[in-house]
Amino acid sequence: MKPLVSILIPAYNAEAWISDTLRSAIAQTWERKEIIVVDDGSKDQTLAVARQFESEQVKVVTQKNQGASATRNNAFAMSKGDYVQWLDADDLMGPEKTASQMEAAERCGSKRTLISGAWAHFMHRPYRAEFRPSPLWEDLLPAEWLMRKLERDIYMQTATWLVSRGLAEAAGQWDTRLLGDDDGEFFCRVLLASEGTRFVKESKVYYREAGASSLSYIGKSNQKLEAQWISMKLHIGYLRSLVDDARARAACVTYLQNWMVFFYPDRLDLFKEAQDLAKSLGGELHIPRFSWKYSWIETIFGRAQAKRAQVMLPRLKWSVVRAWDKTLLRLENRNLADSLGR
């Protein structure tokens, strides 16, 4: 009998997207699968929409709002799969995603291999997504994978991974303290329990850009900044538990420096803590500089206004681009309808 794959979907206020996400899960060509949707106390019609898909293969449950990590933990506790696929309620999987990764897992012959795949951003039109390889799109040992992530400030999207149940259990539960980057931290622990990654280029995930409504968006939230700092310290500890040479320490300092733009000057306490950590690693953190887009604002109006622009302007740009992408989708659908009506 083929292994059972559990596709676990935490959902909160996702009524606009959950149908497409569920269709992509149901359409997986790997036949032996279970799909579990856990609605995290949504205030919209997410639960009602998801329940339209209930079947022997699709289970939908609801709970009081607990947050994304707790919801994923609850979904995992309900699952029975030999392998686990986490899928956010607004993202999509290509139809061969699970099958291509399961074939790779079977060729590996080891349930301690962590399977990854390709991913790309989209807004409303997944067929416009461009898959651009990163240095993590390779078969890598755990230490090298983590090293590259911290050195280059890159990551793999949540749904790219296929995890054996044994690896998921060895990693432990998702950390409910983390309001963002909970997936990055969790899969670091999965990686530490693994023998390494196996990359499957045929496996494709479509990551919907949610902008300021995304859990990963920090903005000026103190809670998210504090949670991000916890995750960063954990990342550094994980890498150093595998290798603690000059390259690893330099990677940790680079990682810290890349993120300080979010902490300085609003959280000088965390910036000072990061400086002390960098010093213990043999490095030094500098006051983050604005890119050319915002440096002129700092020169004319001061750092506070430049920081505000750094937070607000990307949100504004994203809103405009997303609205335009939605308009183009409507025009394309209208043109298609007109052509079929002729």
Image (cartoon, rainbow, N blue to C red):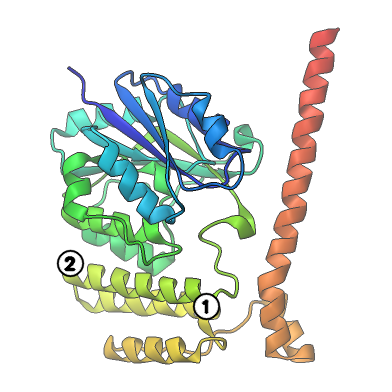
Vertical side of 50 occupied by 261: above or below? below
Q: Which residue in the structure is indicated by mark 1?
A: 222
Q: Position of residue 300 (x, y in %)?
A: 79, 90
Q: Residues within 10 Å of mark 2 (few under 14, many from 20)?
A: some
Residue 262 circle label: none
Q: Quadrant of residue 110?
A: top left
The answer to which of marks 2 and 1 sits earlier in the sequence is 1
Q: Quadrant of residue 18?
A: top right
Q: Residues within 10 Å of mark 1 (few under 14, many from 20)?
A: few
Residue 242 circle label: 2
Q: Position of residue 312 (x, y in %)?
A: 71, 70
Of the two numbered discs 2 and 1 in the rendering, the one whose residue sits closer to the viewer: 1
Q: Quadrant of residue 109?
A: top left
Residue at image point 52% right, 77% down: 222
Vertical side of 173 occupied by 208: above or below? above
Q: Secondary structure at mark 2?
A: helix
Instruction: Give the residue type at disc 2.
Output: Leu
Residue at image point 49% right, 23% down: 53
Q: Nearer the viewer, residue 35 or 325?
A: 35
Instruction: Give the residue type at disc 1.
Output: Asn
Q: Nearer the viewer, residue 282 or 58?
A: 58
- How far apart are the two marked residues, 2 and 1, measured between alpha carbons? 31 Å
Q: Is residue 67 left or right of residue 166?
A: right
